[in-house]
Image: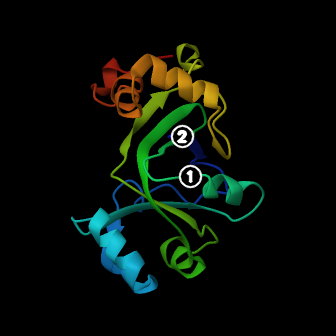
Amino acid sequence: MDNVFIVSMEDEAAAPFGTTLEEGCALETVLPFLDDPQSVALRRLCPDGKCHVWGVRDGGDNRSTWEGMASDDLVLGVRGRTVVSASRVRMKLSHPALAARLWGGPFWLMCFSDRPHVGEVPIVPQMFWYLDPDGRGFRRLDPKKRDNILRDYGSFDVFVRLGLRYDFPFNFRHSE
């Protein structure tokens, strides 16, 4: 079953949020680090020549959480009590040299995603049925909250578009 993962975008355990996730990076930057099957898969997933990638440190519970991720899982980037990105997992890769090239740091448990929805969506009390008010760390969302999302919205895509209101102009989104 599809899962939802929370990644803190201000936690030192996660790679710096910025161009590699939001804007994407050129495939040509990434491909020299990959073997042939990985290169073919990434080219297929990124036909526009850009890939969207983020990473977390390999420590604590991060590896087991990362290993539990699968293609099409939803990943929400959270800063404080605000969702700042929503994307789907497309491919995972553990690669220290590539992480050093992209971020200059040890964030080698990487996730390639589709182009993320980006914006500031406050996690207000009305959303606690679906999301935790605390967005720190890297973890899988409680299955009960995932089930609430799927029961009330029917799919993660509808939740992202309507529940998080990424399809609405900024001034119509949830307010505190």
Q: Say what amino acid the circle numbered 1 marks.
A: Met
Number of residues whose C-alpha sits closer than 10 Å to that of mark 1, classed few (under 14), some (14–19) or many (20 or more):
many
Q: Name the residue under label 1.
A: 69
Disc 1 versus disc 2: distance between alpha carbons? 8 Å
Find residue 173 and report its image quarter: top left
Return the x and y of residue 175 as percentages of the image width and height: 45, 17
Q: Say what amino acid the circle numbered 2 marks.
A: Asn
- In the picture, measured across the screen, residue 58 lies left or right of residue 117, that is right
Per the image, label 2 sits on a secondary structure element best described as loop
Number of residues whose C-alpha sits closer than 10 Å to that of mark 2, classed few (under 14), some (14–19) or many (20 or more):
some
Residue nearest the viewer, comparing 145 with 26: 145
Task: Please give the name of the residue rendered at 54% of the width and 64% of the height, measured from the top-left corner.
Answer: 110
Residue nearest the viewer, comparing 174 with 42: 42
Q: Mark 2 points at which residue?
A: 3
Return the x and y of residue 86 as percentages of the image width and height: 43, 41
Task: Please give the name of the residue rendered at 40% of the width and 21% of the height, measured from the top-left corner.
Answer: 153
* Residue that sits furthest to the front in the current view: 1
Return the x and y of residue 156 as percentages of the image width and height: 41, 33
Task: Please give the name of the residue rendered at 35% of the width and 71% of the height, measured from the top-left corner.
Answer: 41
Mark number displayed over residue 81: none
- Above or below, 165 against 108 in this view is above
